[in-house]
Image: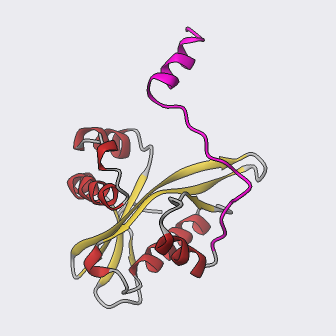
């Protein structure tokens, strides 16, 4: 899928495109606004330089941007994960955010439809993401699209000093 590809939508004036290097400030702004909504602003340490390296030098993730009449109003950051049981890559949605002034217009569902289209076009069988337990409106939104919670699984994480301590057990 070409990184300059545009996706037309059913909402007049709303189009979705892949982010380009010059969009990094927009992406960082969306990340900060999402973190504020999720009450996690204190955890944002990303910078424009880090995002430029991660997204466009190392290609560790991709971003689509939704524009309404040419103004960025939504974004989604995603990457491939891998299912050993399926034997293939799938898409993992890290973040999706729609500007508060544009909620209720159906843009979130269109962004998800675009992610689903990308997944299907790439031969993926799944689109996965996490949701905070307290976020009832998002849970209802996901359910309305047919998404089901993976209640049989618990998310675990190693980060910061715990990650480095474990890594230090195996020296190169």
Span colored in magenta? 147-172
Residue 155 lies in the magenta-colored region: yes
Direction from residue 95 to residue 168 in the image, left or right: right
Q: State the predominant SS element of the stretch in magenta.
A: loop
**In the figure, 146 relative to 123: above or below?**
below
Percent across and percent down for residue 121 are: 58, 67
Q: Is residue 129 visible?
A: yes
Q: Give the farthest residue toward the top.
A: 171
Frontmost residue, 18 versus 168 = 168
Residue 80 in the image, given as x and y percentages of width and height: 56, 51
Q: Identify the residue at image location x=60%, y=40%.
A: 156
Residue 94 located within the stretch drawn in magenta:
no
Please, is residue 163 above or below residue 87 in the view? Answer: above
Q: How is the image coloured?
A: secondary structure
x, y (%) of residue 131?
52, 60
Q: Quadrant of residue 62?
A: bottom left
Q: Identify the residue shown where x is 76% and y is 53%.
A: 86
Residue drawn 25% across and 41% down? 47
Q: Quadrant of residue 150?
A: bottom right
Q: Front-most of 93 and 16?
A: 93
- Classify the position of the C terminus by image quarter: top right
């Amino acid at each position: 899928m070409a990184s300059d590809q545009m996706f037309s939508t059913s909402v007049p004036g709303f189009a979705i495109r892949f982010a380009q290097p010059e969009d990094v400030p927009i992406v960082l702004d969306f990340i900060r606004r999402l973190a504020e909504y999720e009450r996690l602003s204190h955890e944002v340490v990303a910078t424009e330089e880090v995002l430029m390296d991660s997204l466009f030098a190392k290609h560790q993730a991709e971003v689509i941007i939704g524009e309404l009449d040419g103004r960025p109003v939504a974004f989604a950051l995603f990457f491939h994960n891998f299912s050993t049981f399926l034997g293939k890559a799938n898409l993992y949605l890290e973040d999706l955010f729609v500007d508060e002034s544009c909620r209720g217009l159906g843009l979130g569902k269109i962004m998800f439809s675009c992610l689903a289209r990308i997944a299907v076009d790439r031969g993926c069988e799944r689109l996965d993401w996490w949701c905070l337990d307290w976020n009832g409106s998002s849970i209802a939104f996901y359910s309305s699209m047919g998404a089901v919670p993976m209640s049989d699984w618990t998310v675990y994480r190693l980060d910061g000093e715990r990650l480095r301590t474990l890594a230090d057990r195996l020296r190169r």
